[in-house]
Amino acid sequence: MHTTTELRSIIHGRFPDSRIHRAINEPVPLSLMDIAYWQLSAVRKLSLKQQPKILAALPSLQRGAVWKPNQIELLWDSILRGFPIGSLVVCEKLTNQASRGIGVNQDSDEFTPTHHLLDGQQRASAIGLGFLDPYPDPGNSDKDVEVDTLLWLDIAPDSGLFPRNSTRNYLLRVTTKAHPWGFNVDELRETKRLSAEQAKQSLEAFNCNKSVKNGERPHPIQGWPYVANAPVPLAWLLIEAQSILEESGTLITPEKSVELWRKVKERCRKFIEGRNPLPSEQLDPRNRPLLVHWAYRVQEILETWLEQPQAPQLLALAEALARAVSTQLMALLVPVEALTQPSRNEEGQSSGNNKPATTDRIANVEHLFQRLNAGGTELRGNDLAYSMIKAYWPGIEKTIQNIETRPPETQVALLGAQLALATDDDKLPPPLNVTTLRTLARIDDGQQPSDDSKKMRQGELDRIKTMFALKGQVSSEAPIKLALQRLDKWFLYDDVNRDQRWGLPPVLRSRMAEQAPEVFLFLLRLTHHTTQEPEPDVRRKLLGLSTALHWFSQDRQRAVRWLWETSPAEWCDGSAFFKNQKPLLTQLHELSDDQRHKTMANILTPEQLSDYISIDTFNEDSIGKWRWWDTLVTDQAKKEGKTADERQAKYGGLIKILKDYNYRNNNGLLLMYAQREQMASCFPNYDSSHIGYWDAHNVPWDFDHILPQSAFADMRTENDLMEVCKQWGNTIANLHIYPFEKNRSRQDEKANKSLPRDESTRMLLNPFELDTFSLETKDIRFNKDKPQNSEAPRKVYEFVLAARTRLLRIYGEWYDNLLIGHLLQSDNQSTISQTNIAAND
């Protein structure tokens, strides 16, 4: 035991016994500028008094930052107020781990790290973002600066934009690539998007200032936050505050605060001079307060402030900035012994091992990382497995990051490793799990295996390393990269090549890898083993099979195990589709004898689907009584002399998906495919490789109700016409993919007033059908005891028929373009739909 005095000496580095010194979690104070130094070359060029005590980078096993904009804003509000923030956990640089940059710096090659950051990555990234200057040189053009996220401080918040009951003291604003206009103020951890009208007004402002072409979504440096009165890049303020403190010490006097704001005003002047935004006097006076460029607005406010040097806001905000740059947080050092001593599951392997005792033990690193993360955003399942892969085989993430277009990083790693474990036999390899990974890692010690089991594991390990170019190959020739490139070329939508407009939008490729990994692995196996591109019709059928499994299979694992028995060569030359007497999709449906849990839904032709949702079941006089279950299952089963269960067993699997009210399920994926031209045209730069961009606040589109949901979702009134509108209005028959900013500006306007007719074909509508989807609210929102408009039943009848037609059209887009009819035939005579005829029968 140590005395209190001895412990203080140990903490402050004065105790002579270095062994004891390393035996505790030694805290090291770091300034925010120290942490920014790890991430930003611009900060490293500033005149710091000395290099930070710790130069940290991320070890390979760390995942990317997962914080949302709201969390970044609240952290900096705490810093400006002087609230303590959590410590970081670091260790001496791990010799068996590659290093990569933190936060905005994805490359740590500019300095040699001394330590690895194990916990606190999100805090460190948010701190680095505060020092990121998006406009370092007024002479730079916008496109010269590669910044996806910016952090601003509103120096003069408007009470109308910044509620007085907010728990924040300072209005920090984050703008991103997906939302260059920023977000609304919200106290919760969830990020709240702007309304479409606000986004539309922001675009107008950016366009007026000639920052961006009409119709394009601007880059963050071309815009500024909408919910802000006088936003300034936070880095400008912090860097000027740091400069003044280095000259004058820790106190900000009124004179120094005036000096700070004069410097900020001068930066605005240089910015305006170098970039020449549209002067406010040239704007339409009616819109001037909104459209004026942020730099003019800030310059105007600072001129007013500086006319009153004793103004309290000058000093108060300068003091907050001084607090921020003077803030220190602690980095806790993990003792060397905690990582170098063998863990229990490594001790059994140590005998005869020639490794020195000081070599970092990977099991300890893995266990420490898991426990540190248990207190933050928990790592589970695939994320945990990927972190372990990076821990055991450093460098794998660099191979993956060098693949320009791809699914999310985690899925590439796990599926690539699973593919490497597949042998030449016909058995689907099981997904990687923690036990398998640890077993493989234990034999990766450079020793020659001694028994057959170890030799087999060594072979598996070698194949994984070869797959990701970890055995000395050039990373550009990594087999996983080549396989993914071929997969994209064979199966993705190509707007230039008219012969491949049947392909998937990239987001659906990534969703398949994430949601149906075994199906994606099936395709990846083909592109890995076959370099010769199959014929277009073969590729269409392969994609049709894969999407059918992704969207309509209840047991994808079982289905892919069966498909795996056929060789890649047979799939790629097309012979696999006709090797059995029964149609391929029929065989998949019949793999299970359990009627309630079929391997795959019974896939219908569009004609069969049209017959099921028969036009004869709709009657204008009783249209309000139509229901998906009562009309199509119960009533029709009685007419056929069958039970409801028998009819449901035959059709229910497919219909359940098509009529699903939750458009974030597989029905939404089918709609995305049907509107792939719209996806390619409106969202060509959407990054589907980063799973964070799948969050609702980052996706640049909405699922928009063509007939506004408000027309039939009023809970205060109830009638049959409203109910049948719900039956159809909440399905994909009444939804379309639409840019977020355009959709939100629609609000509850009728379709024929708010949706352009010249874009209707991209929505899978005929122009005249927009009128049919434009019911008057008064036609359906009435109480049972009130008389209805005499025309209402006819209008609702026409809407329901139009919705039925559009649902058949959506389904037919998939069925026809991916040759699903060929998969329902046992020979070359396939059934191709006559969708438009069936839809209008």
Image: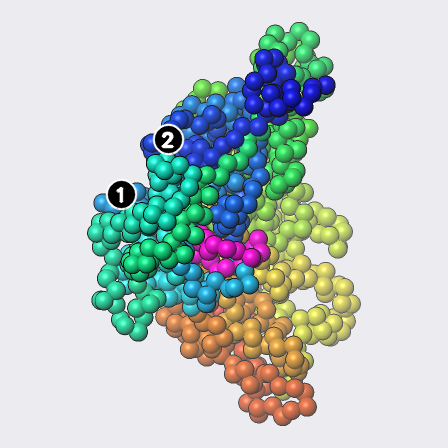
Total number of numbered discs in the rendering: 2
Relative to the observer, which residue lies in front, 768 or 600?
768
Placement of 101 over or under 360, stated as above or below: below
- Residue 335 position, x and y percent, is 61, 21
- Residue 458 position, x and y percent, is 60, 18
Look at the numbered discs 2 and 1 and tell me whether their residues touch, using CB distance below 8 Å.
Answer: no
- Residue 690 position, x and y percent, is 49, 44
Identity of the residue drawn at 64% across and 9% down: 353
| Viewer can see residue 421 | yes
Asked whether, in this view, residue 276 is left or right of residue 10, the answer is: left
Q: Amino acid at mark 1?
A: Asp
Residue 137 circle label: 1
Q: Which residue is mark 2?
A: 48
3D distance between C-alphas at marks 2 and 1: 20 Å
Quadrant in which the N terminus appears: top right
- Residue 30 position, x and y percent, is 49, 32
Q: Amino acid at mark 2?
A: Leu
Asked whether, in this view, residue 639 is left or right of residue 317, the answer is: right
Residues drawn in magenta: 167-190
Placement of 547 over or under 448, stated as above or below: below
Relative to the observer, which residue lies in front, 345 or 288?
288
Placement of 508 over or under 281, stated as above or below: above
* Label 2 vs 1, first from the N-terminus: 2
Residue 354 position by quadrant: top right
